[in-house]
Amino acid sequence: MDAITIIIGIGCFIAGVLYGEMRQNLKFAQKIMTDPEGMIETINKVQSEIKRLQAEERIEVQGLPKDSVEVRIEQVGEQYYVYRVDNEQFLGQGPSRDQVLVEASKRLGNKNLWAKDSAQVSQTT
């Protein structure tokens, strides 16, 4: 009897959560249909707040801190090459991933470097 009560209780809880979520979605859709200008105004307020926070450097843009540069590392044969992702600027070459990151760091100064870990070797030789 206790197991059945627990199962019924869990089922009621799940049904309640689903009903509540469905009801909220319907209320949201009704709000959009009855007051689209108000929703557009709310969206514009959110966008302006995001821009304000970006200007104050309180949030990151594209997931990277302001003082960082995303780089791409290629391996061609036994040689590694590093490029900036944003403008494809060549930053250095070397015999290892670590060495090309050191070379890129020398060229960029006090910037943090971000590189995706890729085991894929370039097919150009």
Image (cartoon, rainbow, N blue to C red):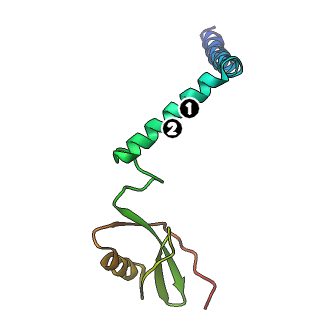
Secondary element at image label 1:
helix
Q: Nearer the viewer, residue 95 or 11?
A: 95
Give coordinates of residue 75: x percent, y percent.
52, 83
User: Can you tell which quarter of the image residue 122 is in?
Assistant: bottom right
Give coordinates of residue 80: x percent, y percent.
47, 84
Q: Residue at x 57, y 80 (%)?
A: 121
Density class for disc 1 (Cα within 10 Å; few <14, some 14-19, many ≥20) is few
Q: Residue at x 66, y 24 (%)?
A: 36
Residue for badge 2: 47
Secondary element at image label 2:
helix
Horizontally, is 83 left or right of 20 in the view?
left
Give coordinates of residue 68: x percent, y percent.
37, 62
Amino acid at the residue labelled 1:
Ile
> Which image quarter is the N terminus in?
top right
Horizontally, is 93 left or right of 38 in the view?
left
Q: Is residue 33 above or below residue 52?
A: above
> Which image quarter is the C terminus in?
bottom right
Amino acid at the residue labelled 2:
Gln
Density class for disc 2 (Cα within 10 Å; few <14, some 14-19, many ≥20) is few
Q: Is residue 106 above or below residue 33?
A: below
Q: Nearer the viewer, residue 80 or 30?
A: 30
Q: Nearer the viewer, residue 96 or 89?
A: 89
Give coordinates of residue 5: x percent, y percent.
62, 9
Q: Residue at x 50, y 31 (%)?
A: 45
Residue for badge 1: 43
**Gap in angstroms between the C-alphas marked 2 and 1:** 6 Å
Q: Are marks 2 and 1 in contact (CB under 8 Å)?
A: yes
- Residue that extends furthest to the left in the rendered view of this protein: 110
How many numbered discs, if any? 2
Q: Nearer the viewer, residue 123 or 5?
A: 123
Question: On residue 88, which mark appears?
Answer: none
